[in-house]
Image (spheres, helix red, strand yellow):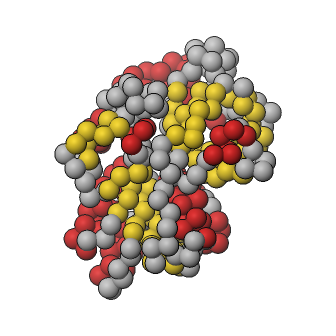
Amino acid sequence: MYEILYREDLAPVTKLIEVKAPLVARKARAGQFVVIRVNEKGERIPLTIADFDREKGTLTLIFQEVGKTTMMLGTKRAGDYLASVVGPLGHPSEIENYGTVICVGGGVGIAPIFPIARELKQVGNKVISIIGARNKDLLFWEDRMRSVSDELVVTTDDGSYGRKALVTEPLKEMLEAGLKPARIWAIGPAIMMKFVSLTTQPFGAPTIVSLNSIMVDGTGMCGACRVSVGGQTRFVCVEGPEFDGHQVDWNLLLERQRIYVDEEKRALEHWKEHGCQCDDGC
């Protein structure tokens, strides 16, 4: 069992929990993820590591309440426990002193882009960051991103805060103005990462994305997380989660993400109807 030491509501549907997991925290690196279960019979879901503290032995996880399992996770408070936390999984981000880099975080993707930007800054890169959300209420960690960035651009779709724009707009303007970043990282909803990749491709700017495909076991055995990259089948859990955004078959990824929409909807409706708060996986 893994104790939740701290919980914070970052936005109406975006929650933060700090979990005691010393063995995982000891080896965690930027770009990696964990697979958790809320209870013993619960669904296994992947969550990218937003932060870690090796001395305290803790992981910071950020999630949005979008389905039954994340809704159940959202009911947890400090002092409660998770049934399991497996990780760190996946390959860490390749952190080097590249020169000038751009980090783009959209929505809840701001969480995993933060440790990447921090480590890139620590090794000497000039870090330009762009973060965005649908509206002001869904933005979080602006202060953290500013602390690890040489330049930070904030956007909202509706203009309620920062610049009214999608994250692709200031990114395209920078590239059109002649900026030649050595690498670009983009993390967020699949549709956002798709259009970031389409924006950067004409400029030949290397673009790395962190894929959020369907995942079950996290060990490469089930094959649920398979994606097509450069015409080859790749497994996100063991070969990713980061891939060349210009090589990803985005249409296939988006299609596969919709496979269990009906089942997810029924599970959530059942959970809401019965108001179950037990730990037996109901």
At x 43% / y 38%, what residue is drawn?
237
Q: Which picture quadrant has residue 63?
A: top right
Task: Indicate left or right for 21 with 258 as reference.
Answer: right
Indicate the position of residue 153 as horizontal and vertical percent values. Answer: 50, 74
Indicate the position of residue 62 as horizontal and vertical percent values. Answer: 60, 46
Q: Nearer the viewer, residue 67 or 33?
A: 33
At x 39% / y 25%, what residue is drawn?
221
Q: Which picture quadrant has residue 232?
A: top left
Pick out the residue farthest to the left: 231
Q: Nearer the viewer, residue 120 or 195?
A: 120
Indicate the position of residue 207 as horizontal and vertical percent values. Answer: 35, 63
Q: How many marks?
A: 0
Indicate the position of residue 241 as horizontal and vertical percent values. Answer: 42, 46
Q: Is residue 261 above or below residue 17?
A: above
**Which image quarter is the N terminus in?**
top right
Q: Nearer the viewer, residue 127 or 28?
A: 28
**Which image quarter is the C terminus in?**
top right
Pick out the residue farthest to the bottom: 177
Q: Is residue 130 above or below residue 250?
A: below
Q: Is residue 21 visible?
A: yes
Q: Is residue 7 visible?
A: no
Q: Is residue 79 above or below residue 188?
A: above
At x 58% / y 64%, what residue is drawn?
119
At x 64% / y 52%, what residue is drawn?
51
Task: Indicate left or right for 237 with 64 as reference.
Answer: left
Q: Is residue 127 above or below residue 53?
A: below
Q: Nearer the viewer, residue 47 or 122?
A: 122
